[in-house]
Image: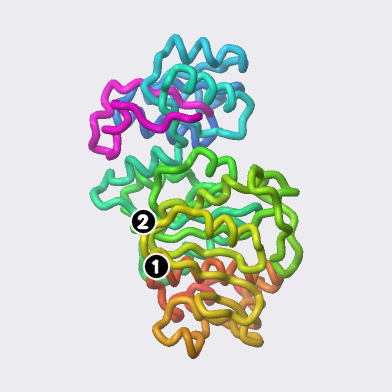
Amino acid sequence: MRIRNSATTATLASWNAAWSGVKVAVFGVSERGFAAADTLAELGAEVLVLAPEPGGERERLLAVIGATFKQLQITEIAPQLAAFAPQLVVVADSEQPGATEVLRAAQNSQVPVWSDIELAWHVGDKFGVAAQWICVSGQQDVAATVELTARMLLAAGRRVAPVGLSAPPVLDAVRDPARFEFFVVGLSGADLRLLDGIHPVASALLSVDAAAGAGDAAGAEDSTGVTSAAPATELEPYGNVYTNTKLACIYNRHSLATEKLLAAADVAEGCRAVSFGLDTPPLAGLGLVEDVLADRGYHAERRNSALELATLSELASRNLATPQDVANFLAAAALARACEVSPAAIAAALTQLPEV
């Protein structure tokens, strides 16, 4: 079982914590791995980066920032970690060959393991008040929904960055002097296996289908968004997207699996569940009333009426014509509405997309 904290890492809950001299091993030399190493070096940690593949240009840059890089065979990972004796292991490339060996070696040595996502959460206060997180996961359309959500918040005048899956690393956004108010974080199933210490303001699970594989970002789904029921063991990591959510958990009411994962999630007291789907919206849901995308999730009169967000023809004019496009827009709108984005701002975000 993964160890999350020790006496040392329990104190590392801020950019301003005593990071200087802390020995940290980073697994992965991808964009995310380099961002983790660069952040830790900036914090003053002693950084060793391990990877099964060559570092390329990033290997040179790691030397510039004062980190050590070692390309290793999988069988060399455990001995190298033991020799370095890290106080923390950060796994940035959890789907790469060797990640399992890193986790096993860390567990055997009783060394805490964080993902680069969790590291970003801990050091998010570099410029004072940390950004609020909106988390999005699923086996398809995560990047599209993240981008739509970010556009809606931007239209509402908020400083926002789309990060994570198919977007820049969240650690780069943490260190950006733009001082973002919100991060919209795309998360894969693999990311969620190593994530349990963050507290998003809102979260969404778009769809899951065990036939696609728990780590796959492009699962099979029909045009209505319906996915098949699946064994809980294969889908369980996806439920972590909801853990500790403060205000609203968004789920696909055409996917029984997402609803079950939400029901089992440990969320903050007072957090509401809001559904999205391509049918008439129930109370606490977003959906379609004829050709109108409608919100019955957030406004005061939601028991008796719905608010118009956009029309199908308006979406089609912006190349969002398929049922999946509509579902993505509804999920994004549900996340944005949880963060007090008005229907007018959501409509404005749509008009800012390129016309067909």
Instruction: Give how far across and how far down residue 126 sits, in percent.
Output: 28, 43
Please say which color scheme the image uses: rainbow
Q: Residue at x 60, y 59 (%)?
A: 258
209 shown above or below 33: below
Q: Residue furthest bottom?
A: 304
- Precedes in sequence: disc 2 or disc 1: 2
Residue range of the region highlighted in magenta in the rendering: 1-28
11 drawn magenta: yes
Q: Residue at x 49, y 31 (%)?
A: 91
Residue 163 visible somewhere in the drawing: yes
Identify the residue under disc 1.
Answer: 339
Instruction: Give how far across and how far down residue 192 sits, in percent.
Output: 53, 44
321 shown above or below 121: below
Magenta segment's dominant SS is loop
- Give the numbered dot on residue 132: 2
Q: Amino acid at mark 2?
A: Gln
On screen, residue 310 versus residue 212, left or right, reads left
Q: Amino acid at mark 1?
A: Cys
Q: Answer yes or no: do the residues labelled 2 and 1 have beta carbons within 8 Å?
A: yes
Helix or strand or loop: what does disc 2 sit on?
strand
Instruction: Give how far across and how far down residue 277 sits, in percent.
Output: 62, 72
The count of marks equals 2
120 drawn magenta: no
- The foreground one among 267 and 168 is 267
How dense is the environment of label 2, judged by Cα within 10 Å: few (below 14), some, or many (20 and up)?
some
Q: Quadrant of the C terminus?
A: bottom right
Residue 63 visible somewhere in the drawing: no
Q: CA distance from mark 2 to mark 1?
A: 10 Å
Helix or strand or loop: what does disc 1 sit on?
loop
How dense is the environment of label 1, judged by Cα within 10 Å: few (below 14), some, or many (20 and up)?
some
